[in-house]
Amino acid sequence: LREYITSLFTSKIAIYDGAMGTMIQNYSKRNKLDEEEYRGDRFKDWNCNVKGNNDMLSITQPHVISGIYKEYLEVGGSNLIGTNTFSSTTIAMADYNMEAYAYELNYEGARLARQACDEVTAADPTNPRFVVGAIGPTNRTGSISPSVEDPSARNVTFDELVEAYFEQIVGLMDGGADILMVETIFDTLNAKAALYAVGEYLEFSGLDIPVFVSGTLVDQSGRTLSGQTGEAFYASIRHAKPMCVGLNCALGAVHMIPFVEKLAKVV
């Protein structure tokens, strides 16, 4: 796998799918996708509102997520597609009281992507497609205080992040992910926790899984939310030996060009 991806990346422009959230929004413009649809039959009596919890659609509306995967593969021509698991950690799922479903969300998100990739690959074996297990940043930050009155305050610890990420990784790999990507990183400490969890999983499993890392810059200063430039961000995570490092989200493609160029010179 690693050899093939290296060859792919060095011989052509490989395409990785776009955002899942915007595709779900586009679907909802054409089809009914309200609280009832998010809940489905299984969670029809859930104790809080869940509309907006896009990751749970892998369980309650799998045809929607599978359709988006297939559209990216067949219409967009993606070589790699990311799983619908951006918020599938116990930490992020606490907003919906769904911490207990973190493993299942990752498993189902990866399984549906695996199924879509296998079907498209079977139709054209000369162009294999791959599943990238998407590991999001969570909705908490390990290095920044949530309180302006107390700079030392934190609402999550490094160990809590590692534990949450490790469970996510197990679900993604059990579901059939080929690659793991720590993505949309705004806080380098969160990324370090995710990469530590990846390292722990690789050590325990004995597998060789390619790892991608993608940070996000918050404004034209070219810095992450935790204050690092792209070059400094890379220096902070290079010990994990990621197969590739990039940037996503935030500024839009045109404005990100100079920052990607700077990052490319140090990676």
Image (spheres, grey):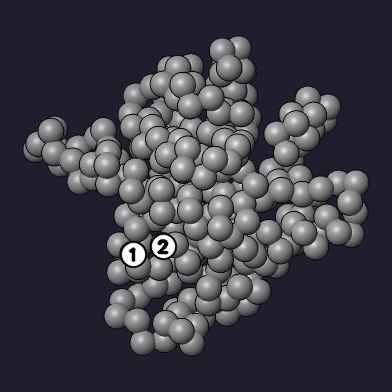
Front-most of 168 and 97? 168
Q: Residues within 10 Å of mark 2 (few under 14, many from 20)?
A: many
29 displayed left or right of 67 = left
Q: Residues within 10 Å of mark 1 (few under 14, many from 20)?
A: some
Residue visible at 57% across and 49% down in the picture: 133
Residue visible at 60% across and 12% down in the picture: 265
Q: Secondary structure under badge 1?
A: helix
Asked if 138 appears above or below 217 in the picture, the reply is below
58 displayed left or right of 147 = right
Front-most of 194 and 141? 194
Q: Residue 88 occupies which quadrant of the picture?
A: bottom left
Front-most of 117 and 183? 117
Asked if 66 appears above or below 191 in the picture, the reply is below
Residue visible at 42% across and 39% down in the picture: 200
Q: Residue furthest left?
A: 149
Would residue 178 be seen by someone viewing this image from the given angle? yes
Identify residue for label 2: 102
Q: Residue 245 occupies which quadrant of the picture?
A: top right
Q: What mark, if any, has residue 230 been given in the picture?
A: none
Q: Where is residue 223 in the image (x, y as percent from the top left)?
A: 42, 24
Give the residue type that dot 2 points to.
Answer: Ala
Identify residue for label 1: 99
Would residue 183 be seen by someone viewing this image from the given angle? no
Asked whether the beta carbons under mark 1 and mark 2 sit within 8 Å of each other, the answer is: yes
Q: Secondary structure under badge 2?
A: helix
Q: How far apart are marks 1 and 2 (CA)?
A: 6 Å
Q: Position of residue 87 (x, y in %)?
A: 43, 55
Which image quarter holds the C terminus?
top right
